[in-house]
Image: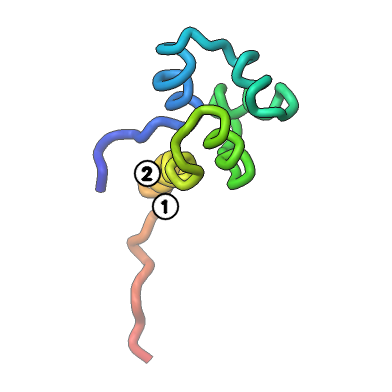
Amino acid sequence: MARHNPPHPGEFMIQVYLDPNNLSGREMVSKLGVAASTPNRILTSTSRISPEMALRLSEALGRSPESWLAVQYNHNLWHAKQHVKLGKVGLTAA
């Protein structure tokens, strides 16, 4: 199991795209063509990236849609591994 907490896609966007390119969230919203609240929820880590948003991010910022979804998937899976108790899960003999 990975020992580090993969960043939420919003944190990733800020660290890799917004901060280094001196872009604001507002500028990103204009590139995505969606209501301002949608990317804002992603940037504040309160919402997840949907396949539709992955397509928009791919077009606006680069990277493949699959890579945007992979960032979300890795974040979700790491958190699930921290909270889901699997001790009673297993195969039973029939």
| Residue displayed at 46% across by 47% down | 66
The circle on residue 33 is: none
Query: Seen in the image, is 28 located left or right of residue 83?
Result: right
> Vertically, is 19 above or below 10?
above
Residue 79 in view of the camera: no
Residue that protrudes farthest toward the bottom in the picture: 94
Characterize the local packing of mark 2: few (<14), some (14-19) or many (20 or more) Cα atoms within 10 angstroms. Answer: some
User: 5 or 35: nearer the eye?
Assistant: 35
Query: Seen in the image, is 63 located left or right of residue 49?
Result: left
**Where's residue 93, x and y in %?**
33, 87
Considering only order in the chain, which callout, 2 or 1, is on the residue closer to the N terminus? 2
The circle on residue 78 is: 2
Quarter of the picture holding the C terminus: bottom left
Q: How many marks?
A: 2
- Label 2: element kind: helix
Q: In the rendered image, which residue does mark 1 sit on?
A: 84
- Label 1: element kind: loop
User: 74 or 22: nearer the eye?
Assistant: 22
Type of the residue with mark 1: Val
Type of the residue with mark 2: Trp
**Where's residue 27, x and y in %?**
62, 14
> Vertically, is 85 above or below 65?
below
| Residue displayed at 45% across by 20% down | 17
